[in-house]
Structures are given as C-alpha cells and as structure tokens.
Image (cartoon, rainbow, N blue to C red):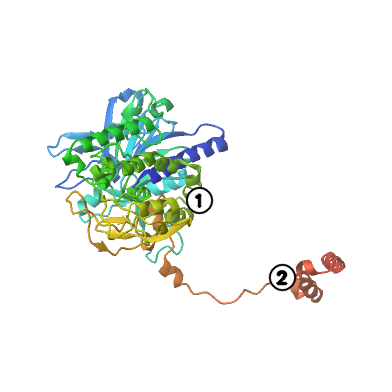
Amino acid sequence: MSEKPEMEKMLFDIQRELSESRRKYGVEPMYRLQIFPCTFSMGTADRAYTTCFVDRTEYNDNTEPVDVSYMPNIYDTRRATKYDPNTRIKEDYSYLLKPLKAGMLLAEVRGKQLALGAGHHQITVSMVLESHWVNMPRQDFNEITSICVPGANDNNAKAELMRSFVIPERLMAPNSSSNTSQRTCNIPVAFISDHNVWALLDFSRLVQFRLRSSDRLWTIQDFTPASKGRWYDLWSYFPGGPDWITEHDNAVLALQQWKRAVTSSTKHGNKSILSYMTEASLSCAFNGFGKHTVYNFLFLVAVFPGAPASYVCATPAVWERFSSQIACYMAHFRSDAFRKQCCGKANSLNAFDYNYTAGSNYYSSEVLVFRKHTVRVPKELYNTYIRDGLLDDAHTMGDNYESSPHQLTNLSFKKLNVIMRGKFFTIIRAQAPDNRAWRDGEMKNFEDISTLGKRTTVGPAEFREVLLNKADYHVVSSIQGKGGCPKKVCLLCTHPKMYLMCSLLRCGPGIMVGLRAFVALELTGLLDSN
C-alpha cells in the first residue's frame, strides 16, 4: 500500500511536471478529467466492491453540454451504471462520458490520500496496494487506451467486462523478460492535457476514489490545507485524520485525544501500538503511516511493535520519544534531501521504465528494519537501546534496568541484525512480559526485501508496471557476447600515406607539434589531389 513516502513522491512529481510545463510552454497547462469505467472492479457475489463513488449534488448537466457528435467508448458505456444487489442504480457515470471542461490541475496530499481536481471535477483517491500515478506523453496515452482487451479473470464473462489496456511493445524494456506475451495495465481515471497525461494505474483493481462534480470550478483555495474553503470536504469520504506536515496542530490534538482514549479504557489500551498506527479505522492520529513506515518509526524511537498502546502512553520516557518524533519523521518525506535522494525521474522518455537509482536509494536510506536483514543504528539510538535493556535477551521489557558504562558506544553507528519475532521486525532482544496485552512470537527466518526481484515491495519505484521493465537477471546472463575489443576501422587507411598518418594521429597528445602539422599538410594535399 502507498504510504507517506510514496504519496509525497507522487505529489512532488505532479508539482514538478506542472512547473516544467509552465516554463516550457509559457502558459498554465490545462487538464480535463476522463474516467474509464470499463476498468473498474466488479466485486464478487460475496463482496460488493465499488471503484468510483460519485457525488454530483452540486452539479447540473447544463454546466457541460453534451456534444452530439461525440461517441464514447462502447466498453465504457456498458459499464456506465453500477447497480446494487436489488438492481437499483447505485452509481451513474454516464454524465462523465463526454469531453469535460479543462482547468488548472490542482493536487494535494493528506496522509495516504491524494486529491486532484481540474475544471468542474475533483477526485480523492484512497491509494491501495499497487496503485500509483504515472505521467506520460499524450501520444503514448492515446496509443495505450486505443486498444483494450479482456482483463485477467477466471470468469470469462467478468473478464470481458473488466477490460485492460495494452502496453505497446516499444514501451517494454529490452532484456526485461523472456516472456514475450503482451503486457497490460488498468487505468480507471486520468487527467489529460494537450501535451501530457497523469494516469492512475492500478494492477489489482482495488483502488477507490470519490468523484465530486460542481457547477463551480475548483480553485487553489479549495486545495489549501486547513482553509475555510472546501478543504475538509475533500477528505470526508475515506477514514483518515489530519496530516502531520500540513495540519501539524490538528495532528497534535488528535494524538492527545488518542492518548486520553487509550489511558482511560483497558479495551483500547490493550491493542498493540502497531495496530493503532496501521489501521485508519482505529485512530485518526497516525494518518500517513503504513506497515513499513511504522516499523521504521518504532525502531527510531526504540519501541517494540507488539507493545500495547497503554505501555507507550503510560511510560513517560517512551511517550516523550514517541510523541516528539512523529512530526519530524513525517516532515522528512517532504524535505529536499528525500526528494533529491528518492524522487528523481528515470533517465528515459518511457513512462514505464524502472528507476534503478530511486529504488536503490530508497532501500539503502529509507528502509530500516522492515524485511531487512541488517540495519545501521546511530550512536545515540544504540545507547538508548542499551540503557533500556532492549538488547539484553535476559531482560524483560518494562522492568527497571541498569546498564554498564562499558556497554555504551562512542562509534558513529553500530550494525545490528534485524530479527522477526512472530510477525514483528525489530532489533529488540529483550523478552516481552507474560501478559496477554503484549504480542510476541517465535523467531522466524525471512527474505530480505532486496532479494524479492520483481515482486512489488515498498518505495516510490516499486510498482507492478515499472517493475516488469526491470532487467531480468536470467535473460541478461544468457546473452552471449564476443570477447576482446573491436578493431578500430579507418576508411582512409587504404592509402599508403594515410595509413602512416592515421597511425601517428592515434598517438594522441604525446606526438610532437611539428609532426602533427606535417600530417595535417599531407592530409590537405591528399584531399586536394582527390
């Protein structure tokens, strides 16, 4: 699932592309929204699922009259209406299947949600699993969406309705796979301009977004954090709370309210700190956190992931570390250092090319303990673990502990092994108390995230469509080349004098000035004679 780092990277990409377009074309780029219902999920007989939720209470059909000459895609029109189990209309997308009015592209992030708007329409996307935004040239987008095929589904009838777009062969990187079958992608929604397109790609079809239409154009004021405009309405549909970067004061209040709820109720206090920080339905104080960012953060504040929330809130030293570092940790993902390290563009015009630099940098600098075998522990943090007895397997967490001065380190960092205790990744060796509120488990072996190949993992570069363009080791290693250096060829060397002159010229800087002049004169005479 996309977490705060991935969301901030997508927002930065959008802002950077808009800035480059203004500089290149000298005008504000104008975008229009387009949806593709043919790619929406249909759910199952046991579980209904809706990709797009429409709110058009502020919208009139006369705002954007239909061009009678326009013919929408037949595959979209037959999925333009979604019915509930009682065959009543649940969602109607038909009014959107026309060329919509363009407007300035607006974007903002709140935790793990991304809002975009242009013209009379705005969407708020709950980013899940492998969904991500990709920028591509308009001609590439037109080529991709011109051909759709039945999707990957065991039910042929469903596959025919849930379509996928074909990725052109020219956008498939050489040596990325020995499998020559066609590749496809799912694009439920896109924002289109004259020159480029921002398309939402979702391999798993699990993404959900709320689409709001209004007679009034969406403006920058509506996307200004904590403003009196429609800011809070943007985020009202999906569960979440204030953003730790743009709504810091509100986030602090939400954290304090959460602490009061935890300390006043045994039921709330017995839930693990990991559960609270990863499930938006349990608390609105940790918007933006997901599994790998929670593990990283708990490592940085020396907290065991299976500890109950009551322990974190009731232990003064632990609470001080925990509460004081959330804002700093989140702000890092909008810093210049993070953007320079992990948010660069791939050195390619192909929107589907894998960004090796961003992927490598993110793994080495941002993935600390989540599915990683070793971690560098800074001096101060290491000494905190030592003082609390967390690296002593004879100690029980929560008990008093007296460390020896010789256990502390003066080195800039210590390299420690990460262990997996039950389902938790940590460097903590101390024992969990014999208490049902503490979650723990047996130590297990696990694969390092760097060895997972083309399986999607974490980070702004690790999404299905671009991972498929990652070089395949088996393909590359099977390539047979010729040994040695290719022979240098000079077309003029067939002439006797030119053979000598070309040999002298290859001597490079060491040749005498006079000899170079002689060669130049001889060359001039030869050319004149020809």
Residue type pointed to by label 1:
Leu
Q: Report whether 527 appears left or right of 469.
A: right
Q: Position of residue 315 (x, y in %)?
A: 28, 43
Query: Which of the two discs, 1 and 2, labels the residue nearer the N terminus?
Result: 1
Q: CA distance from mark 1 to mark 2?
A: 35 Å
In-front residue for pair 362/49: 362
Q: Which residue is mark 1?
A: 349
Quarter of the image for the C terminus: give it: bottom right
- Vertical position of residue 446 compared to residue 320: above or below: below
Residue drawn at (38%, 49%) of the image: 300
Residue drawn at (16%, 51%) of the image: 436
- Vertical position of residue 101 compared to residue 177: above or below: above
Kindly state the secondary structure of the residue where label 2 is placed. helix
In-front residue for pair 218/410: 410
Q: Which residue is mark 2?
A: 491
Kindly state the secondary structure of the residue where label 1 is placed. loop
- Vertical position of residue 216 compared to residue 302: above or below: above
Q: Please say if the residues under marks 1 and 2 sit with CB atoms less than 8 Å apart.
A: no
| Residue 198 in sight from this viewpoint | no
In-front residue for pair 366/194: 366
Q: Position of residue 26 (x, y in %)?
A: 57, 33
**Looking at the rendering, which quadrant does residue 446 occupy?**
bottom left
Q: Position of residue 276 (x, y in %)?
A: 25, 43
**Looking at the rendering, which quadrant does residue 25 occupy?**
top right
Residue drawn at (15%, 34%) of the image: 88
**Mark 1 or 2: the one toward you:** 1
Residue type pointed to by label 2:
Leu
